[in-house]
Amino acid sequence: MRNVRALWVVLVLMVMVATQSVYAIGYTITDLGALEAAPNDYSHSQGMNNSAQVVGGSLAEGGGFFHSFLYSGGAMTDLGRGWAYAINDSGQVVWQDLYGGSHSFINTGGVMTDLGLAFGRSINDSGAVVGDTLVGVNSAFLYSGGVMTDLGPGSAYGINNSGQVVGWDEASNHAYLYDGGLMTDLGALGYDGSSASAINDTGQIVGSLYSNGGDTHAFLYSGVMSDLGVGQPNDINNSGQIVGLMPSGILGLDHAFLYSGGAMSDLNDLLTPGSGWTLWEAVGINDSGQITGSGMSPSGSEHAFLLTPNPGGGGGGGGGSVPDENSTLFLLSGLYVLGVVVDCWRKRQTA
């Protein structure tokens, strides 16, 4: 009898351990570092492509200037004075010269295409760029095939591979979709204003809803506009996963979020406990579910990061963690053996 009870205790402990291990944390984090060491070790991510190449800005020249960076293959490369805002799957980078006249450029393997006095924000795989012109009244622009098209007063923030453009229209104070010369007002769901930040290749649009004196809400537009709750989205991938920033509950401090599967999650909750990171903002998500953004690193400096979904760890989903196949098998086996032991014990008791 004592042996049976001892075995029962051991199996219960096995099941408890399996239950703890069956849920894996969702992401592995990579610190992208900075162009300079402390105390100037600052970097901020701005965009990413499907090869997990990341661009943004970092302090350089003794902390006196911002330089654009490209992070690829585990290394950060200095692209020169300025700030990089976007990168496409061909590796073309939209780059802003902050110190030489506020011109925007397309960096294609080191060859610069000058877009003039402009602020380029997004680039698709065909090399089409959208952003704002900086001449006279600021207007949204679309640069494609060497031609700059004025989209009217406002801003353009995102473009997909079909050439559809989204942004903010100054006249209506609403988000818009520009498609083949036609401008569509997306509305604001009764809020005081709206702005669209990104569009994926299926035509899903994300953006922000603004209330005077109130919280900013995220929206998803997929034929109709849906309010996703408090938050500010920055990007959406072709699976419909959305990333951005949301209030953390601590006054003045934002946290990065992932919206997936109908649920919004704080990305800090999907890291291994004790990672030492506080993720402030997520700015990009690719079709593999990898996420880039910026936060407080374990060193105490703001660094760009890259999150990679763990196999079986729920990174591709919206709820945090999902069962790992081996752990689940272990758990079920333990429960089965435990059931057999209990059944034998009961039979002996009644014999």
Image (cartoon, grey):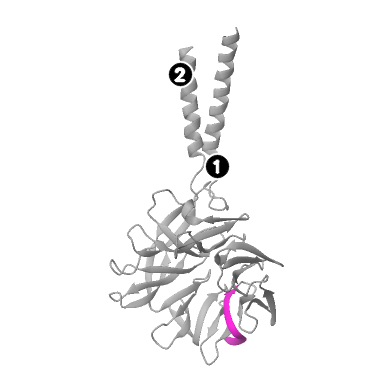
Q: Considering only vertical position in the picture, is 45 above or below 275? A: below
Q: Considering only vertical position in the picture, is 115 above or below 310? A: below
Q: Residue at 49% of width from left, 61% of height from top? A: 256
Residue range of the region highlighted in magenta in the rendering: 147-159
Image coordinates of residue 196 in percent, x first then y, are 60, 73
Per the image, label 2 sits on a secondary structure element best described as helix
Q: Residue at 55% of width from left, 23% of height from top? A: 337
Q: Which residue is mark 1?
A: 323
* Residue 286 magenta-highlighted: no
Per the image, label 1 sits on a secondary structure element best described as loop
Q: Is residue 221 left or right of residue 197?
A: right
Q: Quadrant of the C terminus?
A: top right
Image coordinates of residue 158 in percent, x first then y, are 58, 74
Q: Nearer the viewer, residue 138 or 52?
A: 138
The disc at residue 51 is none
* Residue 153 magenta-highlighted: yes
Q: Is residue 145 left or right of residue 105?
A: right
Image coordinates of residue 347 in percent, x first then y, are 60, 12
Given the current orientation, which residue lies at the most extreme top position? 351
Is the magenta region chiefly helix, strand or loop?
A: strand
Image coordinates of residue 11 in percent, x first then y, are 49, 25
Q: Which residue is mark 2?
A: 6
Q: Is residue 219 visible?
A: yes
